[in-house]
Amino acid sequence: MTRQAIVAANWKMNGDSALVDTMVSGLADIKLSSHVDVVICPSFPYLSELNQKIKAAKLNEAIHVGSQNVSEHESGAFTGEISTAMLKDLAINYVIVGHSERRSIYKETSTQVAKKVHAALNAGLTPILCIGESEAERATGETETVLSAQIQPVIDDIGIDKFIDVVIAYEPVWAIGTGKTASSAMAQETHQFIRQFLAQQNELVSDKVPLLYGGSVNAANCEELFAQTDIDGGLIGGASLKAEQFKIICSAAKGK
């Protein structure tokens, strides 16, 4: 079985209707390898608009729309939150969970992130689970300890077998939006650790989980990064706001 490759765009708190139009028209002639999915995650106000325009352009077989976050709660008095049911109502397929900015700025814990993964799976959404270490943690050799501590609560909550429907994005915090990028060898070494960590509990599941790299991926470095054995695509930030650059990145991904 070929492992799916995924290139996911995280627009963060950027973009507008003009960017939606630019991106849809810019990707109109996109050429993807087999077993590659493209996911675009705009801010909440543009989810429906982007989805409708992708469908109108007949790109919806290749390009999916994802949310940047979701609540672990089904409904209720949670002002400013968005539920899995709302995302399903908008025909959203993917959701980013546990991004480093959610963890650091909004103090989401790994236990809360695990609940969000659980809620997404229960609703039939594909969670893109983000994990990653800070520069200080990398410098002191804590990378594997930090990543293990972020993954284990999710395994404890949903069970390893459910990871067959989970995507993991490794994003070294020190490389997000900084222009710094882990070398391809360093990125591969960490992705290999993640896959081996999962394999300790279920090797068959581990072999099928798409692992994405998310640390200043761009048109110049994507091909080398995506060629690594355990890197199955990327979670793209700044470069995903530029249609031509994002198209090059998407075209470099290949299923393994």
Image (tube, grey):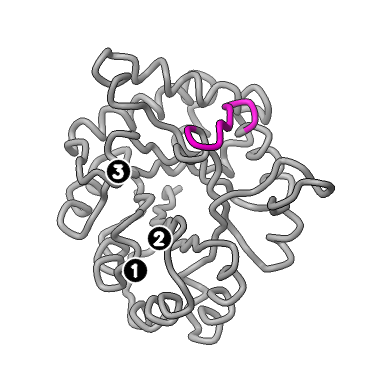
Identity of the amino acid at label 2? Val
- Location of mark 1 (residue): 32
Residue 215 image label:
3
State whether residue 110 is above or below residue 169. above
Residue 73 location (% of width, % of height): 76, 42
Q: Are marks 3 and 1 in contact (CB under 8 Å)?
A: no
Q: Residues within 10 Å of mark 2 (few under 14, many from 20)?
A: many
The furthest residue to the right: 76
Residue 208 visible, this orientation? no
Residue range corresponding to the magenta coloring:
104-112
- Residue 196 rendering spot, x and y as whole percentages: 40, 23
Q: Is residue 72 visible?
A: yes
* Residue at the disc numbered 2: 36
Asked if residue 238 is positioned above or below residue 135 in the image, the reply reads below
Q: Is residue 153 left or right of residue 172?
A: right
Residue type at numbered disc 3: Gly
Please tell me whether residue 107 belongs to the stretch shown in magenta. Answer: yes
For disc 1, the neighbor class at 10 Å (few under 14, some 14 to 19, many from 20) is: some
CB under 8 Å between discs 1 and 2:
yes
Q: Label 1 is placed on what type of residue? A: Leu
Is 67 colored magenta in this rendering?
no
